[in-house]
Image (tube, rainbow, N blue to C red):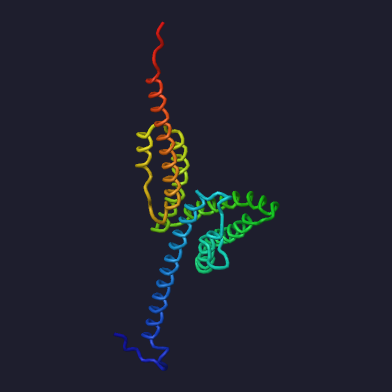
């Protein structure tokens, strides 16, 4: 217990201890808030990478960029990243790139051919720039749940492209079934890529069924052909 006499209440050592304890507590709360915001940014970025892996320039609409009635998915992510970047260092560049992505997305929907063609080229470059920036962020940050999600989303890009290539090359339903087991639907991280892979698998399965039916019909026709008498 502190019994030191003071001329003024603010000069008392106990008041000084309370002040510094309060300051330390405030700093801890602030750091925790920043870490939480950074984690949310990582999760948002993981979802964005998931979407960009499957999104073609010809398939960008108001669902991504927003419109008069509702905000788009890219628009929401860009707004969140912009807000987080004001309080967390290191997200400024990716926030700017997310804003640029929305702008390019709007241009991709233009009815003016020149604007649309320029946007096609810009879209590919912005996607690459976003990936490079997120790779840099991952390499510079300590591991958290959100960061791990972002790392996984970035690494899954190669797996996604590899699976698409393998699905295209299969020649039997058995091979396709084996690839199907590799497609793990991970909500929030792999959602869009999983949907696209499943669509590709379904299309390939239909093609294999059609080929099988055609072969069976051909064999039946051959079997029905009578051997000519000589």
Q: Nearer the viewer, residue 213 or 145?
A: 213
Task: Say which residue appears at 48% left-offset and 57% top-offset.
Answer: 45
Q: Nearer the viewer, residue 106 or 69?
A: 69
Q: Position of residue 43 (x, y in %)?
A: 44, 59
Q: Can you name the residue that lies furthest to the top here? A: 230
Q: Position of residue 4 (x, y in %)?
A: 34, 89
Q: Position of residue 214 (x, y in %)?
A: 42, 30
Task: Say which residue appears at 38% left-offset and 85% top-offset.
Answer: 13
Task: Say which residue appears at 55% left-offset and 63% top-offset.
Answer: 66
Question: Looking at the image, is 129 positioned above or below residue 216?
Answer: below
Horizontal side of 105 relative to 87 (left or right) equals right
Horizontal side of 75 relative to 192 (left or right) equals right
Q: Position of residue 68 (x, y in %)?
A: 57, 67
Q: Quadrant of residue 141?
A: bottom left
Q: Nearer the viewer, residue 178 or 109?
A: 109
Q: Quadrant of the N terminus?
A: bottom left
Q: Can you name the residue that lies furthest to the left here? A: 1
Q: Can you name the residue that lies furthest to the bottom here? A: 7
């Amino acid at each position: 217990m502190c019994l030191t006499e003071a001329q003024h209440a603010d000069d008392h050592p106990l008041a000084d201890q309370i002040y510094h304890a309060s300051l330390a507590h405030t700093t801890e709360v602030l750091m925790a808030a920043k870490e939480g915001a950074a984690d949310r940014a990582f999760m948002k970025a993981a979802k964005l990478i998931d979407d960009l892996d499957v999104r073609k320039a010809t398939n960008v609409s108001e669902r991504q960029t927003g419109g008069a009635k509702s905000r788009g998915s890219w628009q929401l992510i860009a707004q969140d990243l912009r807000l987080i970047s004001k309080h967390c260092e290191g997200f400024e560049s990716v926030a700017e790139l997310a804003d640029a992505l929305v702008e390019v997305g709007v241009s991709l929907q233009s009815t003016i051919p020149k604007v649309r063609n320029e946007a096609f080229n810009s879209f590919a470059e912005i996607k690459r720039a976003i990936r490079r920036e997120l790779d840099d962020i991952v390499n510079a940050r300590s591991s958290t749940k959100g960061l791990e999600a972002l790392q996984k989303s970035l690494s899954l890009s190669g797996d996604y492209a590899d699976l698409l290539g393998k699905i295209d090359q299969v020649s039997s339903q058995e091979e396709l079934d084996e690839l199907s087991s590799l497609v793990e639907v991970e909500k929030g991280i792999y959602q869009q890529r999983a949907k696209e892979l499943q669509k590709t698998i379904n299309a390939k399965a239909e093609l294999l069924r059609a080929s099988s039916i055609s072969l069976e019909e051909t064999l039946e026709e051959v079997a029905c052909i009578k051997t000519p008498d000589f």
